[in-house]
Image (cartoon, helix red, strand yellow):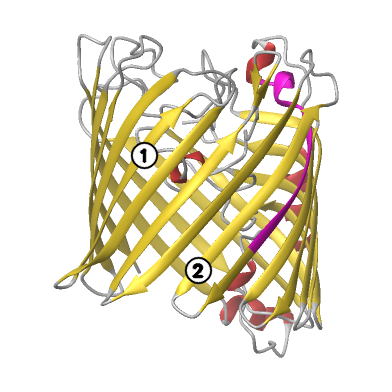
Amino acid sequence: MAVSFHRRSILAAAVVGAMTTPAYAQEAGSASLTDMFTEGKASFNFRYRYEFVDQDGFSKDAKASTLRSRLTFASAQYKGLSFLTEFDDVTAIGSDNYNSTANGNTEYPVVADPEGTEVNQVWAKYASGGASGTYGRQRILHGSQRFIGGVAWRQNEQTYDGFRAMYKNDALTLDYAYVYNINRLFGPDDGPVQPANHHGENHFARGDWKIGDGHTLTGFYYGIDIDFDEDYAAGKTVGNSSDTYGVEYAGSFGPVGLKAAWATQSDAGDSPLDYDADYYMVEGAFGFSGLKATAGYEVLGGDNGVGFKTPYATLHKFQGWADLFLITPGDGIEDIYVSLAGKIGPVKVAGTYHDFSAEDSSADYGSEIDLVGTYVLNKNWNFQLKYASFSSDSDAYADTDKVWMTVNFKI
């Protein structure tokens, strides 16, 4: 299986070593460069998943049995310097009766977990006081990951090649990243319908300001400028170039939590599109008797037949786990949702109901029910069973049922 890696990240690795997220770096400094290695930490993670998909329009059901194996080494810190290397392998266990987007099995519904081996993260970080700089292949997770995330739900994680600078004090967090390549979940190799990488000139800027106890105001800018790739349609690459500006608020009032966000987006770079679209959401949550109830309203607008774009979001977290709306419809989308979460004995459980409709017309897209149960046996083992059922009277969206069984082991 091929190993995919950008040449500039290889240069960074050769100079300073290889890396992942700041959470791995030890707080206490090492006495020498040698101690960076001897006091570092190696870890292993194995995630097995069985995913079943029954979708109208396909004569066969998808049955994907995959294993992701991950090896990570995180150094200790020496005079502010630390590094991490991380390798992932995704392997199909048994027959591949699913469309991974790369295996050519188009008679089955999509389960976007292509096989392959790659460097998932490799970075070097220097930190001093509240400031830090990280160069290499790394995770970038902004807020709820509605715009910039890692798509960690899929077996092949999305990571970013570039430089990230951060500054943090008690009231303010500033975060800027220049990214020249996005390692997408469809990799490590280019597939027949999806590129493994998005090369380009991207700027991610975010500032979080604690305006009071339990209240945070955030401003952000995401400038996405993707290079043209002659092997793929513009909608897979350069057509996702955009400028997005927005604000978020998150706060709590006793047992009540409140979130709200607004953003505006327009085409940018060499995008062949011409549009201006808005995004907004409001969500309230209330905790009582060991339960948490949540209700929300989220809208991604459309203009000139183009929907608001979030190509680097962790999309599985939003608009239903059946993943019918990974690309925003041209008429936009409104999502009204309610959920309830709690515990049954040692098992964490949650259920969510979504109602989907068009933002710019009267079209009814459908509804969805999502259920999940998670059991943590100990620090090494956890298990999850998850279900999604989408139904619609519209010919544009197929009735879909999905079931996942996941076993996670780490040492």
Residue 118 at least partly seen: yes
Q: Is residue 372 above or below residue 404?
A: below
- How many other residues sit within 10 Å of disc 1, few (<14), some (14-19) or many (≥20)? many
Q: Are marks 2 and 1 in contact (CB under 8 Å)?
A: no
Instruction: Give the residue at mark 1.
Output: 354
Residue 113 at least partly seen: no
Q: Secondary structure at mark 1?
A: strand
Q: Which residues are magenta?
A: 237-249
Residue 257: which numbered mark, if any? 2
Q: Is residue 256 above or below residue 218?
A: below
Residue at 57 percent across and 60 percent down: it is: 259
Q: In which quadrant of the rendered image does the C terminus lie?
A: bottom left
- Which amino acid is tagged 2? Gly
> In which image quadrant can residue 105 be found?
top left
Residue at 83 percent across and 26 percent down: it is: 268
Q: Name the magenta segment's main secondary structure.
A: strand
Q: Secondary structure at mark 2?
A: strand
- Which amino acid is tagged 1? His
Provide residue 174's location: percent of width, then percent of height. 80, 66
> In which image quadrant can residue 24 be found?
bottom right
Residue at 77 percent across and 57 percent down: it is: 219
Q: Is residue 140 left or right of residue 397?
A: right
Please tell me which of labels 2 and 1 falls first in the chain.
2
Provide residue 68's location: percent of width, then percent of height. 37, 46
Provide residue 141's location: percent of width, then percent of height. 61, 55
**How many circles with numbers are drawn on the protein?**
2
